[in-house]
Amino acid sequence: MGRDTQKIGDVNELRAAIKFLKEGYYVFKNISLKGPIDMVIVDEKTGEVRKIDVKTTSYRVSWRPGTRIARQLSKEQKRLGVEFVFLDKEK
C-alpha cells in the first residue's frame, strides 16, 4: 500500500470514529498496525457491540469505469463477525 493510500485510510478511520461518536457509540480503536478489526463500537443505550473494518471506497478506472470495487471479508473477519464500513475519499 502506498504512503498516500495509507494516509487516506488513516483519515477515513478517524472520520468513521467521529461519525460513530456523533451517533451515540463508544469507540475503541485498534492500536496494532495490522489486524482484522479497525475499531470496536458499543451503542451507549443498548450495549450492542459491533466490530468494524473501515474501507475507503474505490472505483474502477479501466474495466467498467466508475463502478465500485467490491471488497470481501477475510475468513478471520467472518469468524469474528466483522462488518465493513465504506467511506469515500475526503475532498
Image: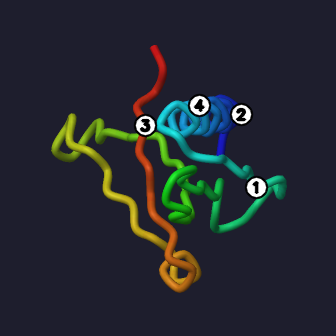
Which residue is under mark 1? 30
* Side of 2 where 88 appears, left or right: left
Q: Earlier in the sequence, mark 2 or mark 4?
A: 2
| Residue drawn at point x = 39 percent, y = 60 percent | 71
> For the residue marked with disc 1, what is the amino acid?
Asn
The image's mark for residue 4 is none
Within-10-Å neighbours for mark 2: few <14, some 14–19, many 20+: few
Whole-Å distance between the Cαs marked 2 and 4? 23 Å
Q: Earlier in the sequence, mark 1 or mark 3?
A: 1
Name the spot of residue 3 as percent of width and height, x first: 71, 34
Which residue is under mark 2? 3
* Side of 91 where 44 appears, left or right: right
Within-10-Å neighbours for mark 4: few <14, some 14–19, many 20+: few
| Residue drawn at point x = 40 percent, y = 31 percent | 88
Disc 2 versus disc 4: nearer the observer = 4
> For the residue marked with disc 2, what is the amino acid?
Arg
* Side of 88 where 50 appears, left or right: right
Within-10-Å neighbours for mark 1: few <14, some 14–19, many 20+: few
Tell how many labels.
4
Whole-Å distance between the Cαs marked 1 and 3? 18 Å
Which residue is under mark 4? 18
Secondary structure type for disc 3: strand
